[in-house]
Amino acid sequence: MSKPLPPLNTFRVFEAAARHLSFTQAASELGMTQAAVSYQIKLLEDRLGVALFRRLTRQLALTDAGQKLSPVVTETFQRLRTAISDLTEGAEGVLSISSINTFATNWLVPRLGRFQVAQPKIAVRLEANARLVDFAREDVDVGIRGGAGRWPGLVAVPLMTVELSPMVAPALLAKVGGVTRPRDLLQLPLLAPDEENWERWFDAAGEPVQLQPTGPFSTFETQHMLGQAAMSGQGVALLTVGMFGDELEQGRLVQPFATSVRLEQGYFLVYPESRANTPKIRAFEDWIITELMQDRARRAA
């Protein structure tokens, strides 16, 4: 027979005290006195039979037991808040999205207006960076990330494979009189060359080459930057086909050859498993999948 749990309020107080490492700050957050916080912590420690904090001269520190318990309690309260929110909210409110830079800039931002038209009760807050979000501690609903699609505790919905193909500005291509075979690209500067992926592409195109580094080369942190460099006529770049569809349609970039090479990683929509039925998340997932399907149908036409 399992032991009865300590009172829920003791865990609520512990979570705040562990987060702040301060009884005083926890008391302020919870609207309690410091003495009441100290009493609740002592009650929890007595019920569990272990010390959770080391009371140092001017600060608190978690014991080994406290460090083990803290993330579990934090996640449990977050899941409880999420479940209550999901029961009471519809497809409305603010949808907070954290996305890698290139996907946000090249693909998502130009299309977000259509999502807002389809879901006028949902406002969007978009943050673009490469940082991995801690959904248990941060006010973020969904993320868009690159990788293999395996993140424990998260739903990972495939959005786009990484298929690289050379792209170049039309004016630069015209300077060399155009290209008729893959090897002709070697007349142009290769931007931020990744010899392995370039050699893979030439192999796939049926004209194997062995590139010799002749650096120094400029490097670019994101594909968005690399694409901007290509559009400005600085050279030819290996870019993700699905990410630069608009630039190709508008003639700002040219894809001289249809051949592409697929990498193992891709782009995924991610969110906590506990939030799979949240209306605003489901609305966004349905919309983004539909948009991507329409993009693929246009490219295939």
Image (cartoon, grey):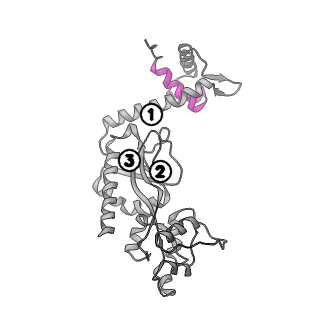
- Image quarter where the C terminus lies is bottom left
Q: Is residue 108 above or below residue 193?
A: above
The residue where tag 1 is placed is 78
Element type where label 1 sits in the image: helix
Q: What is the secondary structure assignment of the residue under circle 2?
A: loop
Mark 3 residue element = strand
Residue 16: in magenta span: yes
Question: Which of the 4 image quadrants contains residue 28?
Answer: top right
Residue 94's mark?
3
Percent position (x, y) of residue 225? 53, 67
Q: Does the segment drawn in magenta span residue 148? A: no
Mark number for residue 148?
Answer: 2
Q: Are marks 1 and 2 in contact (CB under 8 Å)?
A: no
Q: Say if mark 3 contacts mark 2, CB within 8 Å.
A: no
Could you tell which of marks 3 and 2 lies nearer the N-terminus? Answer: 3
The x, y position of residue 144, in whole percent, is 44, 52
